Image (cartoon, helix red, strand yellow):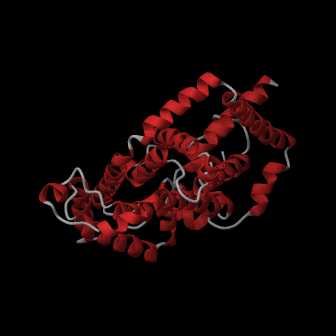
Amino acid sequence: MNKLILSGLVLFSCSHISLAHVEYVISQSEKERFGGVDLGFLLRALENPFNILLIFLTIVLVLLIYFLLRRSKLFMSYVARIEEKAESYYELTSWMLRLGLGILFIGAGVAKVLISTVISISSPFPFLEILLGFLFLLGFLFAPTILLSIILYFLALSKNFYLLGNLEVLASLIALLILSQPKPGLDDLLGIPSFSFLKSFKDFVPLILRIGIGGAMMFLAVYEKFLNPHLSEIVVHNYHLTSIIPVSPEMWVLSAGIIEFLVGLFLFLGFKTRLTSAIAFIVLSLSFFYFGEEVYSHVTLFSVLSVLFVTGGGKLSIDRMKHERR
């Protein structure tokens, strides 16, 4: 029984490892060979009674830990202090998004890819991306830089719909345009005007970011784990994930897809936004150590999660509705 409990907790944690973009860690030939729907493969995970018990036990344990912590006055008072401190970082949110986008575009330009590693590009796009990256970091020509970056994102999306898995990039750009906050930056020092009329929509920034990152994660869960499960199976085999938890590959893929979809859904709906953001941030960090991926390809995930931890769910979120009801 103790082994079963331990397996449930580790499975819940380790399944998050597969939150990374699967197509970033497999070859094009593997994608062409093993892509395609196979619901029978996923359903085989539910044929084993042990797997069903493991899923049930994991849910029970997670809920039990959550409710026990909620009943701890000491723990909840500590959480309240963290949330209060996080809210004081609001003026830094624009800088967080700029850092993420700056690193993304510089990294993509150096790697000669268009935003995502799945789209290779040639001159002059790499130079343009590197230039945009430095302009974000410098806070110079803020509005034109954002608008040109938005055009590049839609160009990339037109080449490969897989860029929906990077929807947080578009959300970051729109959020920055609304915030119109180049400080600290050259635009602020030189007095270059920005789109100040959009600041009236700044209360919707958390919503935009939630739609971006939540939508991206749900898309990746459906497309990579449910519609192309054998692509994720390759990752399970190549990185020996079954040696971490001795369950079948189909169980790994199914659990990873369910967890990734739920995390994305929680963020999309603004349910326990700060808690979900913190968990996703930690797990994504661990995935980079395990898979050895290029940091730039996911850095905007970190910046968006950081901002959502600061802002919370914001308008049109379950968190806000629960707060107003109280």
Q: Quadrant of the N terminus?
A: top right
Question: Which image quadrant: the C terminus?
Answer: top right
Asked if residue 8 can be seen in this view, the reply is: no
Percent coordinates x, y for residue 268 in the rendering: 59, 57
The image quadrant that residue 147 belongs to is bottom left
Tally of numbered discs: 0
Q: Please state if 311 lies on the left or on the right of 241 as rendered.
A: left
* Residue at left offset 85%, top offset 49%: 47
Q: Is residue 264 above or below residue 6?
A: below
Q: Is residue 130 left or right of residue 79?
A: left
Among the 4 quarters of the image, the one containing residue 240: top right
> Could you tell me if residue 96 is visible in this image?
yes
User: Residue at (69%, 67%) from the top-left corner?
Assistant: 37
Q: Is residue 194 left or right of residue 279?
A: left
Horizontal arrangement in the rendering, residue 41 relative to residue 140 (left or right): right
Residue 226 percent location from the top left of the image: 68, 60
73 versus 166 height, above or below: above
The image shows residue 14, relative to residue 302, as above or below, that is above
Residue at 53% x, 45% y is 277
| 286 or 112, nearer to the observer | 286
Q: Nearer the viewer, residue 34 or 288?
A: 288
* Residue 90 image position (x, y, % from top left): 39, 46
Q: Position of residue 10 (x, y in %)?
A: 66, 33
- Quarter occupied by residue 122: bottom left
